[in-house]
Amino acid sequence: MDEPVGARDASTDATEPETVEPETTEITYDEQLYPARPRRLRPRANLRGGSIRRNVADPRAANGLNPAYVQWLVGQSMLKDADVLSRQLSGSPSMWRNPYARPDARRAVSTSDVWFTAYPISLITRQDQSFLAALADPELWKVFQRIGITGVHTGPVKRAGGIRGWQETPSVDGHFDRIGTQIDPVFGDEQTFQRMTDVAEEHGGSVIDDIVPGHTGKGADFRLAEMAYKDYPGIYHMVEIPPDEWHLLPEVPEHRDSVNLDAATEAALAERGYIIGELQRVIFYAPGVKETNWSATAPVVGTDGVTRRWVYLHYFKEGQPSVNWLDPTFSGMRLVIGDALHGLGDLGHSALRLYANRLLGVEKIAEGLPAWSEGHPLSHAANHVIAGMVRKVGGFTFQELNLTIEDIRDTGAVGADLSYDFINRPAYHHALATGDTEFLRLTLRTSLELGVEPVSLVHGLQNHDELTYELVHWATLHKDDLYPFRYQELSGGELAELIRSELVQALTAPAAEFNLVFTTNGIACTTASLIAATQGHATLDSITEDDVPRIRDAHLLLAAFNAWQPGVFALSGWDLLGSLTLPRGEVADLIADGDTRWVERGAHDLLGVAPETERSASGMPRARSLYGTLPEQLKRRDSFASRLRGLLRIRSRYGIATARQIDVPDVAHPGMLVLVHQLETLDDHGLPIVQLTVLNMTGDAVDGTVRSDALPLGATVVDASNDRDIAVVDNLSSFPLRIGPYGARFLLLRRPEPEPEPERDAPLAQPR
């Protein structure tokens, strides 16, 4: 039977005299690590403590003294739901039917290899139609099936934001601050989600959802944690600060529930041993808004009548408290696993994105140095647990891990089946912006050399996030390593800074006022607006109908780069319709706190179901579309969607999604890129077919030479788009090729027939 709301362990119901620990003069390890750490903070002392009995509560009060309020929060708690779900699956034979120990990228890619990345708040639907109902529309899936899209990644659709008192508060990060396992009513309901998965299956597709293992919003679980209720404080990295130390904490204004710590307060609390202090970096850093990764709560009355103030960790925004994966209660782990099982078991999707899964472990390592918060072994262990559980119930996972290539490789060795391609994404943008593929070739080669195969990556065009250009691999672990670049040697740090500066210079004001820098992470833009900037457009108004074909051709080139290599190809509604960024004035309130990404999240109408509607149901303004709706495009052979369909047919026909990349050779022209692959299909000689993806990242035609030691001598080069022979590989393992502006060629090599052995003359008869 469930414990009554507000009940506590018997040991805390009675007041105990505090046991006094004997004093010692010995300097402990803890005191070496934290020189000013008070003795009362020692773990043994922390296990002792009394409690205050609760007073009779005001039935209207929203605090821990009101059993009705506590019960209301428990009813919405993710941890409570997780406990119920886990009991339903425990002991079931279905938990033992699938392999789960090791990631399997090729199995995952074979399940679904071309994904539509949805963003719930930006999809324009029919009047009174929910987001999920729109994605469950058979007409949409017919269009997807015709184009070649086999999966839909819904984006976050569960309840998100927070709770203040009895009221819910809106999301602070695009529904990535989850507060419940229930579908948010603004997007639909559970039955509609299940119908969507059924319709997807009927059209040969599947549905991919999200979990957020790194943090929640400030929902029922966080409010119960603030009240020190049962296991709930164990969900988070949160520390109670004694009242006699509250003078160290900032005052919290009445209209807020917490305040971010400045660097001096962070250092003072770390010196006293309350928190581990500075982390390796401050994500979303903004002066006066987020200067550290720690915030302090206002005073909160607990279920035991004690008023507390807490300091809690949040890697992202203040409303996204971080989950603690190594608390003795394992509450955080239980919450996250329960959320995953709900999606896979109840909702029926086949895969999960692990959002912000790199930041699951944090540890103090030495005085004077930032805490270890990225690439921590606990993150690897937690990812192994999550991904293994998902595989155990028959699904697969992919991760957004913007760390070094070694981190992506090591995490992928035991964790998620696939990883988002943060390695090459900024590099192919840089190649288009500069007309030079040198940095892109460097990223591709480095990935191969360090053991990250393209088949394990999700190669994406635009998603809801910025064009990320942190270039973590070069800017952090390899900042002092030297790399040949532009006829000189640059350190990794210098290389990262150069690439970032060239991207900003080419893609943002004054060159293009419609793309905005987003903190220190990247550039807020759509794929179409990025291309427009590279083609010399400084304002949105300067882009006319006459400019659309050239933007479309470059857009298809970038699609070919991502689709004509092994792995998953992902694109969004903004890509399919050629959406531009929103004028900043239309989202002025949303970008006021520095989150410029809202300019790239304009509303779009895939099927043309509401041509007069100017905003999505969530209130996002409609973005300008260069290509038109999908039904309109599929009526024109030269449209983006129709040509994308042809590109994806080639991808499917030759099985490039599960191929192996074997070479990224040097090129004769800086704007060219050549990728050499071995297909899983064998030729007439029993050998893997060699395939080449050849791209021209410039707006001018290029006459060049393709050369690679991986090319079979004497092989005939065949253009897969028309099955025509175009060249023969010479004795230098090369062949000439002309490729048009923003051109993309999918080439196959047909090995020559072996020369027949010469017939030997019969031996002359010997005389007897």
Image: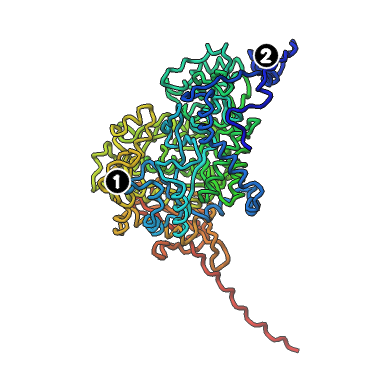
Residue 101 position, x and y percent, is: 65, 48
Report the disc number at residue 625.
1
* Closer-to-camera residue (564/234): 234
Question: Please, is residue 49 above or below residue 3 in the view?
Answer: above
Name the residue type under label 1.
Ser
What secondary structure is found at the residue carrying circle 1? Answer: loop
* Closer-to-camera residue (760/326): 326
Dot 2 or dot 1, earlier in sequence: 2
Q: Residues within 10 Å of mark 1 (few under 14, many from 20)?
A: many
Residue 459 position, x and y percent, is: 47, 47
Name the residue type under label 2.
Arg
Residue occupied by mark 2? 39
What secondary structure is found at the residue carrying circle 2? Answer: helix
Residue at the (44%, 56%) spot, across then down: 199
Question: Please, is residue 452 above or below residue 468 in the view?
Answer: below
Q: Residues within 10 Å of mark 2 (few under 14, many from 20)?
A: some
**Between marks 2 and 1, how big is the CA–CA gap?**
64 Å
Corner quadrant of residue 688: bottom right
